[in-house]
Amino acid sequence: MYCSPRLTEALLCLFALAGWHCAEPDVVQERAMGERESFDLLREQMVREQMEARDIRDPRVLAAMRAVPRHLFVPVDERPFSYTDRPLAIGEGQTISQPYIVALMTQLLHLQGGEKVLEVGTGSGYQAAVLEAMGTRVFSIEIICPLAERAGKTLEAAGYENVMVRCGDGYRGWPEQAPFDAVIVTAAPDHIPQPLVDQLKDEGLMVIPVGDIHQELVLLRKRGGKVTEQDIIPVRFVPMTGEAEKAPGH
């Protein structure tokens, strides 16, 4: 069944697949609109209770979190939990981060719009969509090819035109697109990959979870050829696989 990229029509297809017959377009349309309004309310509640009530203050980040429909980036059986304060399974042993962590990592990059951002670990594509909603160009790498393909299709269908997704090992970044104004890593190596540091512009920022059993979210700043690191909060991400497992520390 072909589904139009527009959200309402995508929901129509979802309801049709769930058992509402396409021969009743007015009924399906009404239920689809009700579903969309319900998700809009849940998304507003998510931003208010999980972000504004905590330490997310950047108005552009809050606007992006309000705008991006997280439910489109999770499996259908997980959609009732799309806006809860927890990660969700997306298949292939991977998860979509809890909304607060997505907002925090985005806020730490101090994006103003127009930046070129490298994301390592596309996953569902949700973080990339939030970054694009901040007015950036996103180059996202996912080591698990079925996830990369699915995320690319989801992003395209939802209208996120400034995100490029490819399947590959993100440890060495995306050299042909470097340098980047910012780098965001959504899987945890036990050390900071030097190729990602090398591809960061001067005055650029990187946010990355680092560690094995115990992980810390680290903010890295490159300035005048020197790199400084700041620990933010303890976190728990899936481990970075591929070359990261063979690099120093293993």
Image: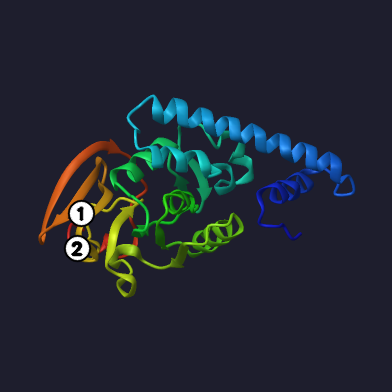
Describe residue 176's horizontal placement relative to residue 220 as left or right: right
Residue hosting label 1: 191
Quadrant of the drawing holding the C terminus = bottom left
Local secondary structure at mark 1: loop
Residue 124: x and y in percent read: 50, 52
Residue 139: x and y in percent read: 40, 63
Which image quarter: residue 98? top left
Which image quarter: residue 30? top right
The type of residue carrying mark 1 is His
Local secondary structure at mark 2: helix
Which image quarter: residue 51? top left
Is 173 situated above or below 86? Answer: below
Question: Of the residues tagged 2 and 1, which is closer to the observer?
Answer: 2
Is 116 situated above or below 74? Answer: below
Residue 26: x and y in percent read: 85, 42
Quick check: marks 2 and 1 in contact, CB under 8 Å?
Answer: no
